[in-house]
Amino acid sequence: MKLSAATHTVSKSVTLAVLLLAMASSRSQQRVATPQWRPLYHFTPSRNWTNDPNGLIFLGGKYHLYNQQNPFGNEWGHMSWGHAVSTDLVHWKHLPLALPETIGKDTTWRFSGSAVWDTHNSSGFCQQGPCMVIVYTADQPNLKKESQFVAFSNDSGKTFTNYPGNPVIDLQKKDFRDPSVTWNEQLKLWLMTVALPSEHKVSFYTSPDLKAWTLLSQFGPAGYTGANWECPALMQVPVENRTGEKKWVLCVSAAGGDRGVFEQYFMGNFDGRQFTADEPDTIRPVDFGDCFYAAIPWNDVPGGRMIYLGWLVPGKQATFPWRGQMSIPRDLSARQHSDGWSLLQQPTAIISKRLSKFAGSKKITIRNMVLSGKDRQLIASGETNGNAYWMDAEISITPGTHVGFEAGGTSSPGRGSAVIRTGYDDASHSFYLDKNPSPGTPLRSPGAMRAGAAAADSVIKIKLLFDKSSVEVFFQDGEKVFTVPVYPEKGATGLSVFAEGGKAIIRSLTIWDLSATRQP
């Protein structure tokens, strides 16, 4: 993220309008604590501003999460790397700042990047055994440029020393950022994916030692080019129901255009030199909501699991003493259709398989509930301790049925009484999420965020994750995902279900109350 000297023009990670609104809101409001909106099972910093996740790596039984952080306040600025670790991706231990900014003639802000474990000391940085190496963008506003820096750690990522030979790649460009680095087994080299934002391109570099980098190729322009490209990630994800088969996917974020906060993906192939997209002209959103951004995967997760984490751009409502949060970590996979491929995202099984442990006995279960006509039945209001729960539902419907949920509502279900309305409309074959619907608005609100279904479905699968100030909804095993920030009023904790235009049967529905989850 970059700011110009006087006008604070934004060129990274969030739209100008969103960021300025967030800053103005933070400054104009008194710094009153807002614990009612502090997420319980999503990552937030203990205090101050956060944006992009950085340096995600699994090491020594712990998930390391570095993140863009302002050590001094609740607004964007003074970009440094914060650091936290977890063994279960729910409970996080906050550690001291890992990579602070430097101030002076060569002021350097530590922008986004990645971390690798240099097992065989290819870099020459390791003192005894393997060591952690990070590759990140150094933004130097006085020099009006961004270049790629390397730093290393011999204490398992607690502290870092910058390589004296930095920068390792310098194109003398104002915008050139967000390196994602992995070990490529086919090439037997380190592979970097990095963005040329204003050119709407991604460059691929290789290196034997993380210091000397050779340009392989470039991809783009393609897909959505209405805003600067940044935070690219090239990954191989497992193919659904095909043991051992994988598919290449390239994800790129681009905020600031007509789509607002936006991240897209390209399914394709990487042959060791060039990435080729199957459908380069097709725009495919990673998330159909309005806040998921700058996502990257964890490196070195056992079993080759691809776990993806994004930043949720905050809404205009100020929070204190923190601002910003991460998404639920997501397991990625690929699904093949008769006419192409799609990316699947599910809340990681590392968390979902342990929900009963996190929730204890606080669980609501419903089986074979019939919904017909325009009837609405309240599922949970006052049965949980607040808006921190995880719902998993499977509903069968007849043709033409519109079925869904209203969450963050009052104790009495009613149109417009909730902070979100979400569901499936069989008449238009679309999934949707309507944030802050006005009282009396039609269920098929024209202002809702929508995603078309591949075909009419008779069984609808919905996961709804509500965590104080964010909602994530996963439809059909994660083929369509919506993520939004929300700020419900005190006591607005209701959850209701509705069906109209046909008949619906809730085959199964489980709600895990996660309100007892606490961060250190």
Image: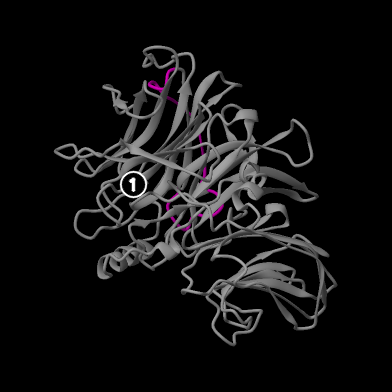
Picture layout, residue 287 above or below residue 219? below
Q: Residue at x 80, y 50 (%)?
A: 338
Residue 316 position, x and y percent, is 39, 68
Q: Nearer the viewer, residue 219 or 323?
A: 323
Residue position marked by numbered label 1 in the rendering: 69
- What amino acid is at disc 1? Gln
- Residue 255 visible? The answer is yes
> Quarter of the image holding residue 441?
bottom right
Q: Residue at position x 75%, y 83% from top?
A: 374
Q: In the picture, residue 95 is in which quadrant?
A: top left
Residue 458 on image: x %, y %: 83, 65
Asked whether residue 346 appears in the rendered view, the answer is no
Residue with the most extreme front position: 361
Q: What secondary structure is the stretch in magenta mostly built from? A: loop
Q: Nearer the viewer, residue 199 or 324?
A: 324
> Pointer 1: residues within 10 angstroms few (<14), some, or many (20+)?
many
Q: Position of residue 128 (x, y in %)?
A: 40, 12
Quadrant position of residue 250? top right
Q: Which residues are magenta?
A: 209-229
- Does 178 appear in magenta? no
Q: Residue at x 44, y 13 (%)?
A: 129
**Hey, which residue is sitting farthest bottom in the picture?**
440
Secondary structure at badge 1 equals strand
Q: Is residue 214 magenta?
A: yes
Between 309 and 288, which is closer to the camera in this rendering? 309
Tell me how the rendering is colored: one colour
